Image: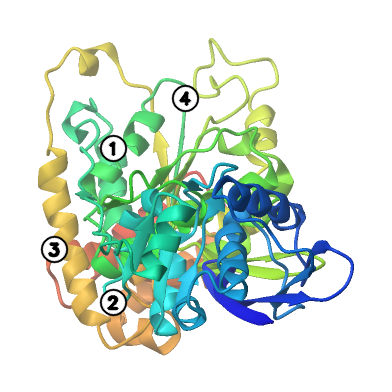
Amino acid sequence: MVAQAYTVAFEGVEARIVEVQCALTAGLPGFSIVGLPDKAVSEARDRVRTALSAMSIALPSKRITINLSPADLPKEGSHFDLPIALGLLAALEIVPKDAVAGTLALGELSLDGTLVPVVGALPAAMAAAEDARTLLCPRDSGAEAAWVDACTVIGAASLLEVVHHFSGRQILAPCTAGEVTEDGRPGDLADVKGQEKAKRALEIAAAGRHHLMFVGAPGSGKSMLAARMPGILPPLSPIEALETSMIHSLAGLLDAGGISRARPFREPHHTASQAAIIGGGRSAKPGEISLAHNGVLFMDEFPEFPRTVLETLRQPIETGEVMIARANAHVRYPCRFLLVAAANPCRCGNLADAGQACSRAPACGEEYLGRISGPLMDRFDLRVEVPPVSYADLDLPASGDTSATVAARVAQARDRQAARFEAHEGVRTNADAAGAMLEAIAALDPECRALMKRAADRFGLSARGYHRVIRVARTIADLEGSAELRRPHLAEALGYRLVGVAKES
């Protein structure tokens, strides 16, 4: 006797349908699971057997074989418990086979039959909707999965409730979506004393999603400035919120099934490993760059990160996605983030102060920042020197535009870009524009071309640097509401590009 249940296996943010085939055959009693299960899936037989025993359901003295199809797809995670239990219950004719076959299930079983919440309910609901199935999951995961309007989501607290639901004795009501949260904005930008150029660079970076590097002495306000970036970014659009939430669902970061409209802000420590930053590990989990998708990745003490970690950022910065290659699988995660890096000018941080600088100055500064390779440095659109703040500036009251004022300008610039790129899939900001599209939206007049030629000849701009300057200039024009790119926009963009750099690498 064979029965089928359905669940999913995760490949990055994609959930692939898995058919759980349960067969009861004559032979020596046994319980085996085949189809490339990992350790957690193999242990499901003990959890399922004990959970059924807690419901006074004894397994027959037959050979029980569970096949997870397709058999060549690796199966990982404890969410296979519930579909395996459903397949067994259908094979034993305790629940209707057709009802189980029309359901996509995931959930971990406790030994007493309680359903434990699992990660990945949101992408599983997307897969269920595409396959025209109802999603059955633990009740605590239902609010997260219910965000997919095209899918009916049923949440159960225990396996007994599932049996009663399928037998018609206690029909479970569909789950409702969790709350939309609007995270409170961090400290105000007006609290930052001085540093007007750095504030301006922060605004430009937020408006066009341009990568930004701050270089300055310790205590000059680099981290304080970066922490205020989320406060000037516009909220996530519905599409962006869904993309980001699917990644956070796989990482188990969605709180009570709620979806946040605030853009993620990730700030890993410089001791983080390559797998933590890029993604990977035993189950190829998303890393910090993917958790920062559609948001900000702040890397303080940038040169202190291991060289291998820094170099692996180069391709994701360009492509907006990362491929994690393993012997048995290749997993792709999106990672379209805004990188904000902060660095001291040298190891002691006092390179600009001759009285406090170490004996190796200025060579120590070149050596320290030399940990950042030329190709990686070339990917920063804006590089800003953050000088120490004088006591006179610290003693002044808060001044300058507030975060709300800057956020309004950034939102207007983003709206102009959204309208400009509406017909171009995958392009949302000026930082995404390339090739003929960039030439069309940022056409250079003769005066601008002459300026760019002089800058390229004098400072040795690479082709990448040339195009990044034009993208930043286009964003500056958007902040001013200008339809055309003019020489002042280009001059300002070049000023941020060339700070402290004698020659592009």
Q: Position of residue 467 (x, y in %)?
A: 45, 72
Where residue 217 is drawn, which disc sits there? 4
Q: Position of residue 485 (x, y in %)?
A: 23, 74
Q: For the view shown, which residue lies furthest in the right direction? A: 28
State whether residue 505 appears in this view. no
Q: Residues within 10 Å of mark 2 (few under 14, many from 20)?
A: few
Q: Label 3 belongs to which residue?
A: 412
- Residue in the image at 31% along x and 48% along y: 201
Q: What residue type is labelled 3?
A: Gln
State whether residue 466 appears in this view. yes
Q: Work out whether 409 lies above or below 423.
A: above
Foreground: 154 or 160?
160
Q: How crowded is mark 4: few (under 14 residues within 10 Å), some or many (20 or more)?
A: many
Q: What residue type is labelled 1?
A: Arg
Tag 3 or tag 2, which sits nearer the N-term?
Answer: 3
Q: Label 2 belongs to which residue?
A: 447
Q: Label 1 belongs to which residue?
A: 228
